[in-house]
Image (tube, grey):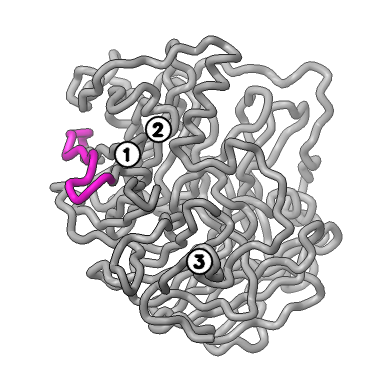
Amino acid sequence: MSRPPEPPERGPDRPPLSRFSYSNSRPKRTLASRLPRWERRTVLVAGAALAALLLVGSGVYALGGDGDGGTSRTEAGRTPGQDAKQPSASATPGAKPTGVPLPQDINAGLAKGEAKAWYAKNEQDLPGGNTLVHDLWFTDGLVVQALYREVTAYKVADGTEAWSIPLPAEVCDTPVNPTPDGKVVVAYRDPGKQKGTCNHLQMIDLKKGAGGWRKKLAEKGSPGSTIIIHLAITGNTVAVGRDVSADAYQVSDGKPLFDLGKDKTGGCTPNDVAGGSKLLVLDWCSGTIGSYGQIKEVDPKSGKIKWRYQLKDRKTKKAMPWKFGKVYSVNPLVVSVYESEDIFNWSVIALKPDGKLRSALNAGKYKFEPCAGEGDSGRGTQNCRGGAVGKDTFYMSTKSPDAESLGPTRIVAFDLKNGKVKWASQPEDKREYLPVAAEGSSVITYVKATMKEPGRIVRIGPKGGKAKTLLTFGRTAQPLEYEAMAGLTAYRGGRFFLSDTLLSGDDTGERARLLSYGGK
């Protein structure tokens, strides 16, 4: 069934906007994970208050930093990013290692044609429980990643550590991409009394391996606006999405640029931000129909709104109770949408550069899960596995037919011009396929490891058909690969990178944080 050119009129008895919805068998989820972001904040604050009588600072917000204009340095000529490490919590006494033992030689026993691998160990003493592992950045032959209280760079060729910058407290968010000249801004928690906040920014030059300006975010709008924030970079601008507002600063020097609050067009306030070649703001709105969503493009220098888009009924032209979820790509713009009252009823749409609807994807007989089963995961709007975007094609991995075990899955290619399915790959040996990157008219795909077999990287397209193997992985690294298979993935310069999304501080043994394959 083809997709109509505009979202259809919906009533209580109408079918889902698309067939992307979950089956009736839905996984059990915690209350906080089922709630929208602002409601999750409420749950987190209430839980913290009950557990530790945590007092979140109140009062009127004012845009500003820590009093130094964002350009101050510490004594002895050291940048803030070069401060000494603070002691971290130790592993739980008597805890059994939950990680896979690290091999002494990860390339032992490689067969002919199998790709060489390297892994990077976590060198920090993590606190108990799980610690978030953040985005991967690439620059000048380095892959860089933030974990706990450090930002660390590794040489892409062999995994050798190039540099590491300690931070005063735990990193709580990172943007998915750096600036064109290789700079990022990370957010870290308050080193002082407000432990539950994510209210400090730190600029880091990835090319130099040096820290730059620091800034403390002022509370604004409502108490606890910095409990959860998300960062996005476009050009020399870093946008900070937080509770009902979004701030922007120059990455080079930390200078404030603009502040977005309630939208002038109605009851819409910022909820999240997305960056890259464009700066996008995702709003949540309230009206007579209840809550709904809006997406808009913002000029990264001035904050001027270039366009706004809402899902509207074709007949009444009024907004429908749907919100915007994950941004798969900003150019071309491909984003998921979901029903406000049922986050499991979802779809994917593509927008034109001027913000008008390009197509709504029609999945037909194929079934999918949001972010390949990860759902929201609390990482921000641009962290979503299971989709890759080319110039005119969107690639997505199907849902496994067995919710309790692995595979098999397919890669389905959608035409962004009309939303129709172009082709679907053939499943193989109950293996799960995950699109990693669009390359030309093809898609680079990770064939996941199983409990017994290592994975591999293949190329599919431009018309589907048989996959061509690009990288075959060895068996020695397979246990590490299988353990990290639910993590972050990237394919750059003929190399594949796989990282855990969480590391446990309860382990007594060493843990790998990053795994890479490439070369013969």
**Label disc, if present, on residue 240 of the rendered structure:** 1
Q: Amino acid at mark 2?
A: Ala
> What's the CA distance linking mark 2 and mark 3?
31 Å
> Label 3: how many residues lie within 10 Å, few (<14), some (14-19) or many (20+)?
many
Sequence order check: which comes first, mark 1 or mark 3? 1
Foreground: disc 2 or disc 3: 3
Foreground: 484 or 339? 339
Name the magenta segment's main secondary structure: loop
User: CA–CA distance between discs 1 and 3?
Assistant: 26 Å
Q: Quadrant of the C terminus?
A: bottom right
Q: Look at the image and tell me whether residue 473 can be seen.
A: no
Report if the CB atoms under discs 1 and 2 are less than 8 Å apart: yes
The quadrant holding residue 315 is bottom left
Location of mark 2 (residue): 187
Separation of disc 1 and disc 2 at Cα?
9 Å
Q: Which numbered disc covers residue 347?
A: 3
Query: Where residue 199 sits in the image (x, y, percent)?
Result: 37, 26
